[in-house]
Amino acid sequence: MVWCAIAILSVLISSAQIDGRIVAIKDRSVTIDRGREAGMLPGEVLDVYQTERMKNPQTGEEYEREVRAGGVLVEEVQDKFSMGRIISSLRPIRVGDILRRRAHNLVRSVSRTQNYLYVDLTPDGVKWIRPGEKLGVFRRMNVIHPITKRRISWLEKVGEVEVASLTIRTFSARCVITSYDKPILENDLIMPPEEKERRLDEIHILNISGDKLLLNVFQGAVPNAELVMMKEIPDNTDERFILAKIKVIQVYKFTTEVQLLTPQHKDKLLVGDKVRVYQY
């Protein structure tokens, strides 16, 4: 069973999008096994990932996970291969490491004692980030619906930073931490201004704790508002929907905490459920 689990996890990891692998390293120069024919372009920034084997000390079960090891800037592209330069490294980069196009501005490292952090930037991030700009730090949260197995994702704001300096050559920025609700971690996201006000279109139950529910932000969510939450039950002919009363406790950047005022409905609500919210 252990090796079966490892095999399944290995398949899941290998099936993720891969934009290349490092086939040679000399000093800080790398050779990539993808070129012009695979759509590689000069100036692209690739994140480097390594596979790390873990072992559960209690059960002895082994599994694999991917960890980000650094970044590479593509400088020269041939038909079958490309040449790049290592612009950041969180750990030693090796031949065979996986490369993926950088899609987000990610926290590289955090200095707890000096209250600053370094951010690895996308090419677009370099264009809009400027010293002195105040930005939000967000963490991608995920839950899996226990029945449909559908992944529900949202962004939770964990802090704010101010850009202190920008280094174009390495696609990085040094930022001062100005506030935080939770400790800022590696791989947290630094969001561009146009994404700060993004809201999720659908309302889902993201977490259930006692009579408290966590929903994503919705229109009309203000503290102390008492509302009706409806969950449809299409497969049940006796009860087509649930009408539960809720009270808004707190509205955050991307989530809303509510209290369930009709506890008899608690057992019929699941994390990941899609709901609608109405005024009385």
Image (cartoon, rainbow, N blue to C red):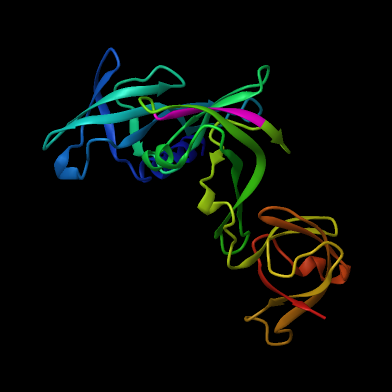
Q: Number of numbered discs present? A: 0
Q: Can residue 183 be seen from the camera position used here? A: no
In reply to whether residue 172 is colored magenta, the answer given is yes
Figure quadrant of residue 200: bottom right
Given residues 188 and 68, the one toward you in this image is: 188
- Give the left or right position of residue 50, taking residue 136 as reference: left
**What percent of the width, then of the height, locates residue 151?**
55, 56
Given residues 274 and 252, the one toward you in this image is: 252
**What percent of the width, then of the height, locates residue 62?**
52, 30
Work out whether 139 lies above or below 228.
Answer: above
Residue range corresponding to the magenta coloring: 171-177
The secondary structure that dominates the magenta segment is strand
Figure quadrant of residue 183: top right
**What percent of the width, then of the height, locates residue 18?**
32, 41
Residue at x 79% of width, y 64% of height: 222
User: Which of the image's four quarters has the C terminus?
Assistant: bottom right
Residue at x 73% of width, y 53% of height: 252
**What percent of the width, then of the height, locates residue 206?**
68, 57
Q: Can residue 170 be seen from the camera position used here? A: yes
- Give the left or right position of residue 266, taking residue 62 as reference: right
